[in-house]
Amino acid sequence: MDSVTQIVLGGAVAAAIGHKQLGRSAVVIGAALGTIPDLDVFMPADDAVASFTEHRSFSHSLFVLFPFAFICFAALRFKFKSDVISNQRLFWLCCLTLITHPLLDAFTSYGTQLFWPLAGNPISIASIFVIDPLYTIPLLVGCVYLWRSKNSDESKQKARRVNHIGLLLSSGYLLLSVLIQNQMQNKVDAALQAQGIPASKVFLSPLYPSLNWWIAVVVDDGIYYDVTLNVLTNTLDISAQQNLGYGVIDVTTPALTSLDWFTNGFIRLEEVEGQLVATDLRIKTGHVGYAFKFALAEKETDGWKAISPLRL
């Protein structure tokens, strides 16, 4: 999810655990810890594809963040005495604030390597758009109430209550996204069966920042279809058959192998102005186009020559 969402989620989770003991400091700590996993974007990468596939890897791994929570706990233990906040509460403040970041990311289309360095495709539940104000606003309201609460016990209790409601609403919205996605999946499966369209893999995700418009990418044996759905109008449209372009290039580059793994095969190849362009079909920015395209090779007289990948 976007940085603002991760900041307010971290602040809201930390406040739910430790605001009574730490006051505003809990919100600040939670916001900071909730941002840490995304700092991997500042780490150097070999090329554009490596930057794309290595984001949300080790810094989002539960195997890394859980031990890191102990380090954060130890550092904060020096600042806050045990008579202010207990060891258990302080540790869970650190731990839950850190791990809710990648867990939320796993609900988007991008792909999150929750179990890095174990093998396997990145986890992408894809039930929520990467930016969704309806998820973020309840958390933001809770954090604002916490920050603006006065020193009286009554004001602080009200702020904590608002924060708890915000967490419940955002969590409920996330659950709703999964339920609607399941309904849309059933519609796609029924439509494909009715039209006799085979499907080896289907990737279904929201098309815009809401749960009303959805798109499914249906892949089978070198071809794919786009299926668009609207919840309110109960409509479903299937595009014409499209080619994945596997015959464009007869060799495999390391970057192409990496993209194929990261996208779980939802990738299209095409020749564009003498360049081999790979497109991630999972992440479509509305009806405008696709968010991630990479030039991987250039066509020469004797065939394709791999180049340092460029994001287009």
Image: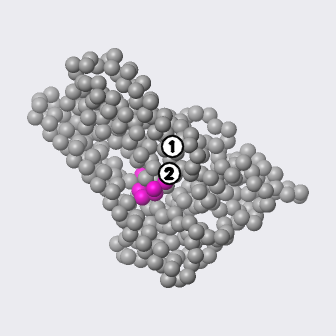
Q: Residues within 10 Å of mark 2 (few under 14, many from 20)?
A: many
Question: Circle 1 sits in a helix, a strand or a loop, which is it?
Answer: loop
* Stretch in magenta: 123-131
Whether residue 80 is visible, yes or no, is yes
* Residue sitting farthest toward the front: 118
**Would you name the residue on which mark 2 appears?**
123
Image height check: is 23 above or below 245?
A: above
Image height check: is 292 above or below 181?
A: above
* Residue 296 part of the magenta-drawn span: no
Q: CB atoms at circles 2 and 1 under 8 Å apart?
A: yes
The structure residue drawn at horizontal position 76% and vertical position 64%, both measured from the top left corner, is 248
Residue 124: where, in percent of width, then height?
Answer: 49, 54
Looking at the rendered image, the disc whose residue lies closer to the viewer, 2 or 1, is 1
Residue 66: where, in percent of width, then height?
Answer: 43, 34
Image height check: is 235 above or below 130?
A: below
The structure residue drawn at horizontal position 30% and vertical position 51%, both measured from the top left corner, is 170
**Would you name the residue on which mark 1 appears?**
115
Residue 237: where, in percent of width, then height?
Answer: 49, 77
Image height check: is 92 above or below 208?
A: above
Q: Nearer the viewer, residue 287 or 263?
A: 263
User: Mostly what secondary structure, the magenta segment?
Assistant: loop
Q: Which mark is residue 49?
A: none
Examine the image and state in which quarter residue 82 appears. Answer: top left
Q: Residues within 10 Å of mark 1 (few under 14, many from 20)?
A: some
Examine the image and state in which quarter residue 241 appears. Answer: bottom right
* Residue 130 part of the magenta-drawn span: yes
Q: Nearer the viewer, residue 166 or 220?
A: 220
Whether residue 129 is visible, yes or no, is no
Looking at the image, tell me whether mark 2 or mark 1 is earlier in sequence order. 1
